[in-house]
Image (cartoon, rainbow, N blue to C red):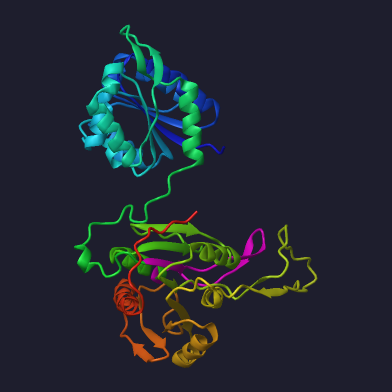
């Protein structure tokens, strides 16, 4: 397994000493480990020991000014691939279930957007208490993986379930969690919205492509275009804000993922075509990406060099898959299929021809001759068999919101909302 970043939160209790061996196992396997030690945990293991084994600073206080300057608690909670709580005491589990954030450990657990694995350790009576059982059920319902404790003799002399699983067992559970991460919720990270009745795309599933594609010629050169991806990403953001479950298939652009959007990154047209096919069925597909029409027929495994002869090496081209036309012909064709067309002349005429050729419902056309790709505004024409709807030049996010309203109205007229969650492997 590739090396991952583990945030290990160590609770109080005599079993905390086992966390030392767990750190050693993780580091031996190449994983990076950052340790957070609770105040109770410090009574059983020292920051110095954990720092030496993890080769990283150990964090103990929410109000450490130096730590907040160098790495704030929000960043610490987000940069890990997996958060592990071991030992997870009854007190820690209760605070996690209730959403209490009164120290660094619980604040990190409430702020993280990464999978969480908890390894409980407590007295048998505490583990079997109805309050603990409720808390564990709540956490599992929230998506936290709570291991079953080991059974055996306790430090207090009692016998039963409640012992911290051995470090090897926790290590194996970490490996399983990293290999099989939970599917992200399509609505995870979405901002607060208006009431459901004011979210016109609630229950809809929308697939969007954005950005360019890069078609390699050799290891250092590729065929591409000037698409920035800004309009496609703005549409994805607007769809999520309107309540839709959004899958964004993005070409190589450095834009942040909009809140509430599932993003899949691709490089080539063939990769994009495969991810689009895997993302169906949906209620609407909006093909905003500027897919390269051609690729190199033969990609060189080595950089193509000039030989000093002045002769230009031949570059044979092959046609890329037509993603929009393929979706239009698919048995899983969405009820509403929207294509985009960036034109430099005869914009509406070219868009009307593309509409007929591709078999989609709408073409959103814009003139890029005067305002090149990458700008912050857009003037578009919505071309369909019923006519042309031309909009004034407005910011791209405003185009996106206006388009989402039009799509919501069209979907309401065509098909009732679907409520099943969108997933993507």
Residue 43 quadrant: top left
The image position of residue 179, as x and y in percent, is: 51, 40
Q: Is residue 196 above or below residue 30?
A: below
| Stretch in magenta | 205-231
* Residue 404 belongs to the span the image colors magenta: no
Residue nearest the observer in this picture, 47 or 110? 110
Mark yes or no: residue 110 visible: yes
Mark yes or no: residue 233 visible: no
Quick one: quadrant of the N terminus? top right
Q: Is residue 10 left or right of residue 222?
A: left
Q: Is residue 109 left or right of residue 289?
A: left
Residue 295 quadrant: bottom right
* Residue 218 belongs to the span the image colors magenta: yes
Residue at (56%, 75%) from the top-left corner? 326
Residue nearest the observer in this picture, 323 or 6? 323
The image position of residue 380, as x and y in percent, is: 37, 83
Residue at (30%, 35%) from the top-left corner? 137
The image position of residue 129, as x and y in percent, is: 25, 23
Residue at (34%, 88%) from the top-left corner? 390
Q: Is residue 379 above or below residue 48?
A: below
């Amino acid at each position: 397994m590739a090396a991952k970043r583990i945030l290990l939160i160590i609770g109080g209790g005599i079993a905390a000493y086992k966390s030392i061996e767990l750190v050693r196992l993780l580091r031996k396997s190449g994983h990076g480990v950052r340790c957070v030690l609770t105040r109770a945990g410090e009574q059983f293991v020292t920051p110095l020991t954990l720092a030496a084994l993890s080769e990283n600073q150990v964090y103990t206080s929410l109000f450490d000014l130096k730590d907040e300057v160098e790495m704030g608690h929000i960043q610490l909670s987000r940069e890990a691939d997996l958060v592990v709580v071991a030992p997870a005491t009854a007190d820690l589990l209760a605070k996690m279930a209730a959403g209490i954030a009164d120290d660094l450990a619980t604040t990190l657990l409430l702020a993280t957007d990464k999978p969480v694995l908890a390894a409980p350790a407590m007295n048998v009576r505490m583990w079997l208490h109805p309050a603990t059982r409720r808390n564990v059920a709540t956490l599992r319902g929230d998506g936290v993986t709570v291991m079953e404790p080991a059974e055996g003799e306790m430090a207090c002399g009692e016998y039963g379930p409640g012992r911290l699983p051995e470090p090897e067992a926790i290590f194996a559970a970490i490996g399983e969690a990293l290999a099989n991460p939970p599917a992200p919720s399509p609505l995870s990270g979405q901002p607060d919205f208006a009431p459901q009745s004011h979210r016109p795309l609630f229950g809809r599933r929308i697939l969007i492509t954005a950005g360019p594609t890069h078609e390699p010629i050799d290891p250092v050169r590729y065929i591409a275009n000037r698409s920035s991806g800004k309009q496609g990403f703005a549409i994805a953001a607007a769809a999520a804000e309107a309540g839709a479950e959004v899958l964004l298939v993005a070409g190589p652009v450095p834009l942040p993922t909009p809140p509430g959007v599932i993003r899949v990154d691709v490089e080539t047209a063939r990769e994009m075509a495969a991810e689009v096919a895997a993302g169906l069925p949906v209620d609407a597909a909006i093909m905003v990406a500027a897919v390269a029409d051609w690729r190199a027929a033969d990609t060189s495994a080595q950089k193509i060099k000039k030989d000093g002869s002045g002769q230009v090496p031949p570059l044979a081209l092959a046609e890329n898959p037509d993603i929009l036309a393929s979706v239009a012909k698919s048995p899983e064709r969405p009820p509403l299929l929207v294509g985009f067309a960036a034109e430099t002349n005869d914009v509406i005429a070219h868009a009307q021809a593309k509409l007929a050729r591709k078999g989609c419902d709408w073409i959103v056309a814009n003139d890029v001759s005067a305002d090149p790709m990458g700008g912050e505004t857009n003037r578009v024409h919505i071309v369909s068999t019923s006519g042309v709807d031309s909009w004034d030049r407005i910011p791209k996010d405003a185009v996106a919101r206006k388009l989402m309203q039009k799509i919501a109205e069209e979907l309401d007229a065509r098909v009732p909302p679907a409520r099943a969650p969108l997933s993507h492997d």
